[in-house]
Amino acid sequence: MIIDDRGRVRRDPMRTSEQRRLSRSSEVLRRTLERVSEMQEADLLPNGVRYNGESSLVRYKPGQAYGPHGDAAGMEAGREWTVLVCLQSANKGGETRFVNLGRTYALASGDALLWPNYDASGEENEKMDHEALPVVEGCKVVANVWLDVEPRS
């Protein structure tokens, strides 16, 4: 729901999913961060990538979706990377589509996607704009975990 500048409550036309913060003590978060650490050790991520303290749990029921958007929130916000973990896949629909790449992923439970929200020059990486397509049948549950990079001295 959105509260507009006049205090009226209305449905968000872009996002119809349900979202809440993911607890810092969550097993999902702990295991995701372990995998991020493993990717760093294998040189699959830049040095200094770390959890920025922000994560969410999102549920999509039939008909729910999230329109095209990017996860970048300004470099100072520390959403340099996104990890999207599928906790429960929909029976039908609910794919993640990268609109500017023309690629669509139907994640199974336990799958994850990782992408950079900024390009090498520090500009928002619009190639990573994505959307959650509508769930047709079942329920989709994902965890979003955002990472930043420690400032270099």
Image (cartoon, rainbow, N blue to C red):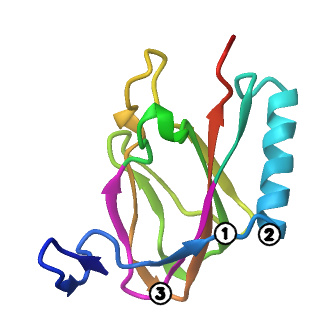
Q: What residue type is labelled 3?
A: Lys
Element under disc 2: loop
Q: Looking at the image, do the residues carrying marks 2 and 1 touch, with CB atoms under 8 Å apart?
A: yes
Find disc 1 in the rendering and name its residue: 22
The residue singled out by tag 3 in the image is 61
Residue nearest the observer in this picture, 148 or 76: 76
Magenta segment: 54-69
Alpha-carbon distance for marks 2 and 1?
A: 7 Å
Secondary structure state at the residue bearing disc 1: loop
| The N terminus lies in quadrant | bottom left
Tell me residue 83's x, y (percent). 63, 50
Left or right: 120 as drawn, with respect to 10? right
Mark 1 and mark 3: span between their CA atoms? 19 Å
Lower sequence index among marks 1 and 3: 1
Residue at image location 42% in from the left, 43% down from the top: 73
- The disc label shown at residue 26, or none: 2
Q: Where is residue 137 in the image (x, y as percent from the top left)?
A: 48, 88
Closer to the eye: label 3 or 2:
2
